[in-house]
Every structure is written in structure tokens, then in C-alpha cells.
Image (tube, rainbow, N blue to C red):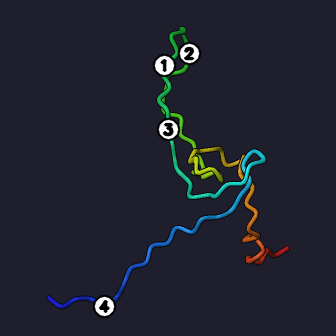
Amino acid sequence: MARSSSEILIRGDLRPCIVINRKALFHRWSDKSKIVEPSPMIGGHNGGVLKYTVGIIEYEDGVVTECYPYEIKFVDGKVKEYCFEN
């Protein structure tokens, strides 16, 4: 069997950001979910799954944590690379 000379490159660029007034590096988005139990009340909700997105970030001191998307402010100016039409 012949060997392929092509390579697959996977990059995960970090983006500088501010999260709750602290410098951080953004790693990626992640989906989370929680099971919601049915309500014990008569006529209450049936329960289900609550799904939401979080950002995985790393603070300057090396602590890695997650936060909500609305808490992240990217500061690398990457949005300027895109053209928005009026």
C-alpha cells in the first residue's frame, strides 16, 4: 500500500480576551447539558434536558475554567479582518 505524502494539520489558535475584568486566553467553545427532573406539582413541567454553550478559558495564572459567552470580550481585533456590508 502506498504512503500518502499529504499532511493533516489541526490548529487550535488561542485568542486573547477579557473575562470579568481579567486577562485570559480563549481555547474553545463547549456544549454542556443538565437533566431537569419533572416537577412534582400537578400540572407542572415534564422535565427534560437543558443545553447551553460555555467558553473554555485560561487565566494568566494558568487556571483553566469555563464561562458564559456573554462574559467574554475578545481583544485581538480579529473582527476587523471581516467585511460587513451595510
Mark nearer the N terminus (3 vs 4): 4
Mark nearer the N terminus (4 vs 2): 4
Labels 3 & 4 near each other (Cβ < 8 A): no
Q: Can you give x and y, in whole percent of width and height, for residue 53 in the image?
A: 58, 46
* Amino acid at dot 4: Ser
At x 27% / y 89%, what residue is drawn? Answer: 4
Mark nearer the N terminus (4 vs 1): 4
Labels 2 & 1 near each other (Cβ < 8 A): yes
Bin the neighbour count of mark 2 within 10 Å (Cα to Cα): few under 14, some 14-19, many 20 and up.
few
At x 73% / y 68%, what residue is drawn? Answer: 76
Mark nearer the N terminus (2 vs 3): 3
Q: How far apart are marks 2 and 1 (CA)?
A: 7 Å
Q: Distance between the residues labelled 2 and 3?
A: 21 Å
The residue at the far right in this view is: 86
Front tag of 2 and 1? 1
Q: Can you give x and y, in whole percent of width and height, for residue 26 in the image?
A: 62, 57
Q: Can you give x and y, in whole percent of width and height, for residue 19 in the image?
A: 72, 49
Mark nearer the N terminus (2 vs 1): 1
Q: How far apart are marks 4 and 1 (CA)?
A: 55 Å
- Mark 2 lies on residue: 44
- Mark 4 lies on residue: 5
* Amino acid at dot 3: Ser
Q: Residue 33 carries which label?
A: 3
